[in-house]
Image (cartoon, rainbow, N blue to C red):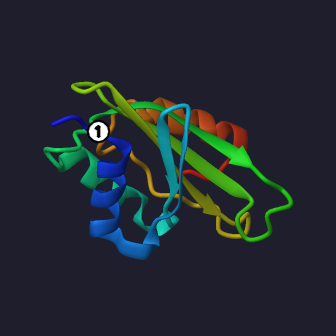
Amino acid sequence: MSLTNEHIKNRLVEKFGEALTNFEESYGIMSFHAPKEINLKVMQFLYDEEDLQFRFMTDLCGVHYPDNVGAELGVVYHLHNLVQNVRLRFKVFTSVAAPQVFTATQLFATANWQERETYDFYGWIS
């Protein structure tokens, strides 16, 4: 079975319901938003499920939207299913008043360097 963005979205909605929002596709890559409180649950699900297998973190970066009150800071995760060569992107947002986001290092060793770099720029991965 070929892994499609529609299948990925259906599996995510089946598992997390309305907690995930802003599904869109750009240049063939699906992206969506997740609450920061479940960023690790979403990553673990994408990693563990045999039909999804997103087991490589291509990139993690921070973004700053100073005019987006209450969600000024964001973390963008780029995950890759190497078997079927499918990529996806998901974003979590937080306020500058509570800037902590759970670390992904227990799941993706590469997150260590990328999170430290994000912390150096923005100071909020914990």
Tell me if 99 is positioned left or right of 86 in this view.
Answer: right
Q: Residue at x 37, y 44 (%)?
A: 5
Q: Give the quadrant of residue 95.
A: bottom right
Which quadrant is home to the N terminus?
Answer: top left
Work out whether 77 lies above or below 22: above
Nearer to us in this view, 30 or 104 = 30
Q: Residue at x 31, y 24 (%)?
A: 85
Q: Position of residue 71 (x, y in %)?
A: 70, 65
Q: Residue at x 39, y 47 (%)?
A: 104
Q: Position of residue 109 (x, y in %)?
A: 34, 33
Q: Position of residue 40 (x, y in %)?
A: 36, 57
Q: Give the quadrant of residue 18.
A: bottom left
Residue at mark 1: 54
Work out whether 18 lies above or below 106: below
Kindly give the residue lying farthest to the bottom in the view shown. 18
Q: Residue at x 22, y 34 (%)?
A: 2
